[in-house]
């Protein structure tokens, strides 16, 4: 989530800000409809077929909404850590309020998550902080490629433990993912001398490890509380950890409005859908589907800010899309 801190600021007219707000408002209605469809109460899930497609629809919806929110944020002239703090705080408040309206209790959600709640907050915060520091130390392409290796890490761990056997489709999906990351990492230009290149790449790799741990934990605790309240409490805690950045980083009013609208209309529904999906979906499958997030982000950035992806980024996105389609042919839920 967020923009490359090293990118040049975009001088966009005020109308683009309100275009962003309007687009987010429209997306909010669509997102709420999606949430109503894929997050029904357990007693309404009447068939095995519904029980299988609901988590798939939820993770695809979350990926699309996260990607669109990232595309919006990428076009704003705002520091990445400040953007993350605002979006996560607003998302947490929105989801906790929605959970209260549904009759949920934050205390019960905190008790259900237990000691894993602080770990989730730390993993989310570390992921964001390490990623943005890495972007300042190393070229964007390699940093982003390593940042997206969480599904590869999860697959390697499962194979090493003997808990997973790959089908031909899954092998093809994994190879396509590796090829896409190679294209993304090696296709861009290495601008200037980077004395801290190795440190930046290592930080990006650690951020991917944080994502892998985060996905694994959420898959274990998502069933212990409602998706709305669980996601809300987790995001609120992560936002509070990042909140000190707002005391030292200034955010313009129009950017603040766009961030708040994006969080409420796109990011919050995405987190709700994600927690719903992780009740039943295998972490590796979820991680691979989430690789399509930049594809949605590129479409949103191009539609709102006319930011066009490079040829390497477009080719990498096609490889990821094919890999995701192959992955979705595999069993949707694993014990």
Image (cartoon, grey):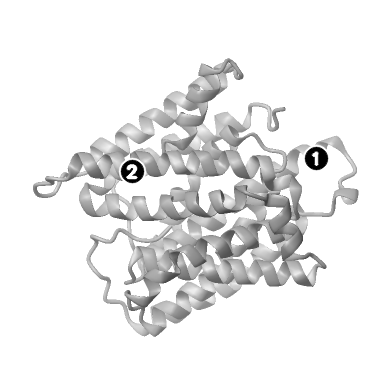
Q: Residues within 10 Å of mark 1 (few under 14, many from 20)?
A: some
Q: Is residue 159 above or below residue 280?
A: above
Picture coordinates of residue 18 (x, y %)?
Answer: 46, 81
* Quadrant (top left, top right, bottom left, bottom right) of the N terminus: bottom left
Instruction: Check the image and name the residue furthest to the left.
Output: 193
Of the two numbered discs 1 and 2 on the same chain, state the one appearing first in sequence: 1
The residue lying at 36 percent from left, 63 percent from top is 80
Instruction: Check the image and name the residue furthest to the front.
Output: 115
Is residue 34 shown to the viewer in this render? no
Residue on which the image places disc 1: 51
Picture coordinates of residue 212 (x, y %)?
Answer: 50, 38
Q: CA distance from mark 1 to mark 2?
A: 36 Å
Residue on which the image places disc 2: 204
Report the front residue among 171 and 303: 171
Q: How many marks?
A: 2
The residue lying at 60 percent from left, 42 percent from top is 217
Indicate the quadrant where residue 278 lies. Answer: top right
Report the front residue among 120 and 32: 120
The residue lying at 62 percent from left, 45 percent from top is 218
Report the front residue among 235 and 152: 235
């Amino acid at each position: 989530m967020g923009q490359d801190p090293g990118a040049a600021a975009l001088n966009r007219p005020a109308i683009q800000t309100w275009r962003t707000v309007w687009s987010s408002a429209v997306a909010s209605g669509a997102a709420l409809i999606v949430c109503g469809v894929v997050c029904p109460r357990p007693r309404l899930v009447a068939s095995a077929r519904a029980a299988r497609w609901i988590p798939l629809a939820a993770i695809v919806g979350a990926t699309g909404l996260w990607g669109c929110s990232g595309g919006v944020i990428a076009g704003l002239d705002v520091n990445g850590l400040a953007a993350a703090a605002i979006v996560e705080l607003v998302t947490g408040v929105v989801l906790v309020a929605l959970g209260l309206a549904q009759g949920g209790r934050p205390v019960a959600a905190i008790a259900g998550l237990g000691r894993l709640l602080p770990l989730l907050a730390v993993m989310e915060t570390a992921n964001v902080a390490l990623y943005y520091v890495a972007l300042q130390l190393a070229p964007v392409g390699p940093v982003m490629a390593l940042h997206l290796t969480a599904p590869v890490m999860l697959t390697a761990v499962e194979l090493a433990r003997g808990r997973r056997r790959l089908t031909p489709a899954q092998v093809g999906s994994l190879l396509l993912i590796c090829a896409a990351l190679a294209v993304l990492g090696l296709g861009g230009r290495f601008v200037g001398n980077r004395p801290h290149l190795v440190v930046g790449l290592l930080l990006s790799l650690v951020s991917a490890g944080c994502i892998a741990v985060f996905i694994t934990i959420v898959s274990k605790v998502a069933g212990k509380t409602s998706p709305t309240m669980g996601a809300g409490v987790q995001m609120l805690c992560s936002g509070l950890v990042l909140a000190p950045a707002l005391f030292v980083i200034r955010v313009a009013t129009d950017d603040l409005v766009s961030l708040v609208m994006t969080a409420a209309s796109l990011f919050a529904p995405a987190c709700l859908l994600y927690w719903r999906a992780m009740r039943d979906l295998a972490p590796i499958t979820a991680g691979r589907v989430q690789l399509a997030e930049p594809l949605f982000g590129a479409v949103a950035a191009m539609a709102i800010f006319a930011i066009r992806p490079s040829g390497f980024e477009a080719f990498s996105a096609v490889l990821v899309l094919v890999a995701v389609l192959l992955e979705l042919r595999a069993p949707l839920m694993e014990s």
